[in-house]
């Protein structure tokens, strides 16, 4: 045991003497997390930090329906989520779209209100900002919903649209009989549709929550996946040092000492596990300090960290026990890490996977690793995370045992 500890400390000092590789692997989850944090305004559960849709509107119509659309941002609640600015020309709109980072330019064509109230086909034009990704899609979806509502409204108004348009233009208000007939016609039309409108298909019930959870925190959901991916990259990178030493002949020279192959391999694997544990602590600290993620009680977090570190180290040991060169290990390790991240739900919910991929997802180390971390970030404790810990313990035990056994056999044969 003393020999293993001495070998481990020696190997650990050598690894930490050149921390460039470790820092590069840690940069991957930190940079991706920072990009998500900046893109989505911090904590997803903070309604005040939600991104605002900034949209330009070119009103070539100046009609009543167009005025209703452009006045939507006057609502105090809408103004918190929608920044709508009017432009006077298409050239101005395109210029501001490029320079002022608006998501889209909505063009209301000339004669839009008249055509809509006369039940004639009319089109809305939406020019999306190609320099942005998420918010232009939001603008498109909102425009599609707006078009649907306007179409339904035109159908409800029916043949009375022309009369309503005249009233909006300030004429016909002295015709009391005509106005009464219009109101009666609209009332009869709503009554004819009462079976479709009443009772409503969707009912809203307001209740008081017992506990304010703060809403969905996108960063707390995404960052654990980035942590797991960073740990896998770190373990693969550090374990590659085994084959590097094999090429240099240092491992074979150690066989001349009174040491068994199992002791040498265990010391190498243990030093990799310590480096991965350091990486885990740094990433967890960065999540708490930079992204304000609360990891819960120390006990469940420590147990999760230990099992995640052992599982990632065991995966890397098993991988490098099966490849011939360091380059093969790095390439295959990168591919497997990305594959496990994709199938394990690092970037999107597992429920979004096709049904035939669900059994494959359960075999992915990433799923259970970042799943446990997500549970802790959501406030879960021992009971909530116990199932994930059991699976991680099994993966760590199997992968580490097989990896150490295979590496020990290769070392004895002189293949290391």
Image: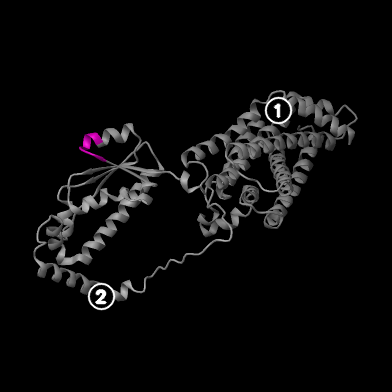
* Horizontal side of residue 163 vs 214, given as left or right: left
Query: Which residue is found at the position 22% from the left and 66% from the top?
Result: 156
Instruction: Mark 1: give few (<14), some (14-19) or many (20+) Cα within 10 Å.
Output: some
Instruction: Mark 2: give few (<14), some (14-19) or many (20+) Cα within 10 Å.
Output: few
Q: Single out the mark in the foreground, 2 or 1.
A: 2
Residue 217: which numbered mark, if any?
Answer: none
Report whether residue 323 is seen.
no
The coloring applied to the image is one colour
Give yes or no for residue 285 being in the magenta stretch: no
* Horizontal side of residue 175 vs 78, given as left or right: left
Report whether residue 201 is seen.
yes
* Horizontal side of residue 203 vs 363, given as left or right: left
Percent x, y for residue 399? Answer: 73, 46
Query: Which residue is found at the position 70% from the left and 48% from the top?
Result: 297
Q: Which residue is mark 2?
A: 191
Give yes or no for residue 91 being in the magenta stretch: yes
Query: Which residue is found at the position 38% from the left and 70% from the top?
Result: 201
Percent x, y for residue 80? Answer: 39, 47
Residue 398 drawn above or below residue 10: below
Extreme-right residue of the structure: 258
Residue 110 drawn above or below residue 274: below
N-term mark: 2 or 1: 2
Residue 244: which numbered mark, if any?
Answer: 1
Percent x, y for residue 287? Answer: 61, 39
Q: Secondary structure at mark 1?
A: helix
Quarter of the image with the N terminus in it: top right
Determine the image quadrant of residue 390. bottom right
Q: Secondary structure at mark 2?
A: helix
Residue numbers of the magenta segment? 86-92
Q: CA distance from mark 2 to mark 1?
A: 81 Å
Percent x, y for residue 410? Answer: 77, 36
Query: Which residue is found at the position 63% from the left and 31% from the top?
Result: 327
């Amino acid at each position: 045991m003393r020999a293993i500890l001495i070998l481990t400390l020696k190997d650990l000092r050598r690894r930490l003497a050149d921390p460039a590789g470790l820092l590069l692997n840690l940069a991957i989850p930190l940079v991706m997390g920072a990009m998500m944090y900046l893109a989505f305004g911090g904590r997803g559960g903070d309604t005040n930090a939600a991104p605002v849709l900034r949209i330009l509107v070119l009103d070539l119509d100046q009609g009543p329906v167009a005025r209703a659309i452009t006045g939507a941002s006057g609502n105090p609640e809408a103004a918190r989520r929608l920044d709508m600015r009017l432009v006077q020309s298409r050239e101005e709109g395109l210029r501001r779209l490029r320079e002022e980072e608006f998501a889209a330019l909505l063009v209301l064509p000339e004669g839009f209100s008249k055509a809509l109230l006369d039940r004639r086909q009319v089109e809305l034009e939406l020019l999306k900002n190609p320099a942005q990704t998420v918010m232009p899609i939001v603008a498109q979806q909102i425009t599609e919903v707006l078009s649907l509502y306007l179409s339904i409204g035109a159908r409800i108004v029916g043949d009375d649209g022309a009369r309503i348009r005249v009233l909006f233009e300030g004429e016909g208000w002295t015709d009391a009989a005509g106005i009464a007939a219009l109101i009666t016609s609209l009332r009869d039309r709503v009554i004819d549709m009462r079976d479709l409108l009443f009772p409503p298909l969707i009912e809203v019930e307001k209740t008081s929550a017992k506990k304010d959870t703060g809403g969905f925190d996108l960063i707390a959901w995404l960052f654990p996946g980035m942590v797991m991916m960073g740990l896998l990259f770190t373990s693969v990178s550090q374990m590659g040092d085994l084959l590097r030493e094999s090429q240099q002949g240092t491992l074979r020279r150690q066989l001349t000492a009174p040491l068994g192959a199992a002791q040498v391999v265990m010391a190498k694997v243990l030093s990799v596990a310590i480096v991965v544990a350091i990486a885990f602590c740094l990433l967890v600290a960065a999540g708490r300090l930079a992204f304000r993620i609360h990891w819960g009680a120390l006990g469940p977090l420590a147990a999760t960290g230990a099992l995640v570190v052992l599982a990632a180290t065991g995966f890397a040991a098993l991988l490098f026990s099966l490849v011939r060169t360091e380059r093969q290990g790095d390439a295959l390790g990168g591919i497997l890490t990305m594959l496990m991240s994709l199938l394990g739900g690092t970037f999107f919910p597992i429920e979004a996977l096709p049904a035939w991929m669900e059994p494959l997802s359960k075999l992915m180390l990433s799923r259970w690793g970042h799943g446990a971390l997500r549970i802790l970030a959501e406030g879960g404790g021992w009971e909530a995370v116990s199932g994930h810990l059991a699976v991680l313990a099994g993966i760590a035990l199997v992968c580490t045992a097989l990896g150490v056994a295979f590496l020990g056999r290769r070392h004895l044969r002189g293949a290391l």
